[in-house]
Amino acid sequence: MSDRYLNLVNSPLGSAVASRVGLPQPAKLRRYAGGDPLLPGPALLGATGGKPAAALRKLLTGAGAEVVDTLGEGERVAAAVLDARSVAAPADLGALRDFLAPAVKGLQANGRVLVLGRLPDGKSVTADATRQALDGIVRSLAKELRRGATANLLWVENEASLGAALRFFLSGKSAYVDGQPVVLGAGTAPDPTDWDQPLAGKTALVTGAARGIGAAIAGVLARDGAKVIAADLTQAGETLAKVANRLGGSALHLDVAAADAPPRLLDHLAAHTDGLDILIHNAGITRDKLMANMKPEQWDSVLAVNLESQLRINDALLGSDQLNPQARVVCLSSTTGLSGNRGQTNYGATKAGVIGLVRSSAAAFAKHGASTINAIAPGFIDTEMTAKMPLATREVARRLSSLQQAGLPIDVAEATAWLASPGAGGVNGQVLRVCGQNLVGA
């Protein structure tokens, strides 16, 4: 669905009018297209404790980035990467100001700011306070950036997943991820043979794949080399078949809320695959009503599809031989599960429940051959569903983020594909918001 306002303010006349009267001026975001370089310009690299680590520089250059150590007068960079893992006292934070102030001034449109830090570990109050300060700096900076630029924070506890994370957060694939912290912990995170096909040889199943975000996820997984099983209700059969055929995958009619869904899924995997490598829990429904008017069937149906189905399918897979080692499970939550939303107590319950599911299941999946489970929490995404909203409501919702626009299904799909990749093995039990740093909620 086209954002007419976005297109208007990016025209010469519209830009001049918006600037004159002080209207929001969202930029057209840099999104990934096949063959794109990691960055459309150099990356400025710095460190708070002296020279940047050689290993970090090697990861950046290995991904195709041109790395520079200084920013000359009038020069522009496509990214600024700061290794702040050495900060241990408040005085150390001045180094972030010294690096970021000129870097932000020299940042190109759609630039990327990426800060690396260490998690507070309870060993020193001073060090922990200083490390946590990085979160406040990055979130606040992300709200200051304009022209489609983003800022994010990587808590690097283990470098196994750092290469894949750099490739995601610096690229156009992270266009709608802004102001977010992600922990890179221990895990099995092998580099792919081909970074353009990181999912080659993998079998992926996407529920709710007939349209919208589910279809976009299926498409990106297939683009990245996976053999995709697109699953949805029988009623969506024709649309589902078109999606599967377009991707060279297969279609599976599956009502995830049905009592027999888990055994039917296991039987299908046993008969048609060598086991499942990637599972995307995308199927979901809404039945919005104020709590005072909520009927039992509206409550129960949303709980059954959005939450209970994921619990039952995960339990069945973990108890079977159909989930391969180093599998990746990604569950679709929502920012509503983090901040709540009027008229969506049932939906908010399920999306918060998914977050609890992911956090509580992480250890069990790690024990299953170093597998992982994570959640994506989309914000306001332009879909067929949001297109039915009243115009004024939709326009306000689009502008309530640091990027001043709605996301697209492809944004959710790109983040899902990163979490589904072998290189994200150090990310487990976490929630990644794909919301343009929505100003509502956490």
Image (cartoon, grey):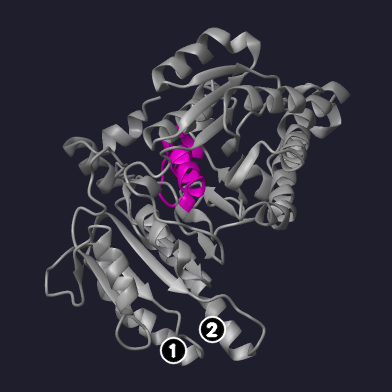
| Residue 254 showing in the rendered view | yes
The image shows residue 298 at horizontal and vertical percentages of 80, 24
Residue drawn 41% across and 66% down?
A: 141
Task: Tell which circle, 1 or 2, labels the residue nearer the N-terminal end.
Answer: 1
Q: CA distance from mark 1 to mark 2?
A: 8 Å
Give the x, y percent position of residue 275.
60, 35
Q: Residue at x 65, y 27 (%)?
A: 270
Query: What residue would you read off at disc 1?
Result: 92
Residue 183 numbered mark, or none: none
* Residue extent of the magenta highlight: 395-422
Image quadrant holding the N terminus, namely top left
Magenta stretch mostly in which secondary structure? helix
Q: How many marks?
A: 2
| Label of residue 130 in the image | 2
Disc 1 crowd rating (10 Å Cα; few below 14, some 14-19, many 20+) is some
Q: Is residue 410 magenta?
A: yes
Amino acid on which the number 2 mark rests in the picture: Thr
User: Residue 99 placed where, x, y %?
Assistant: 31, 78
Q: Residues within 10 Å of mark 2 (few under 14, many from 20)?
A: many
Q: Position of residue 224 (x, y in %)?
A: 38, 38
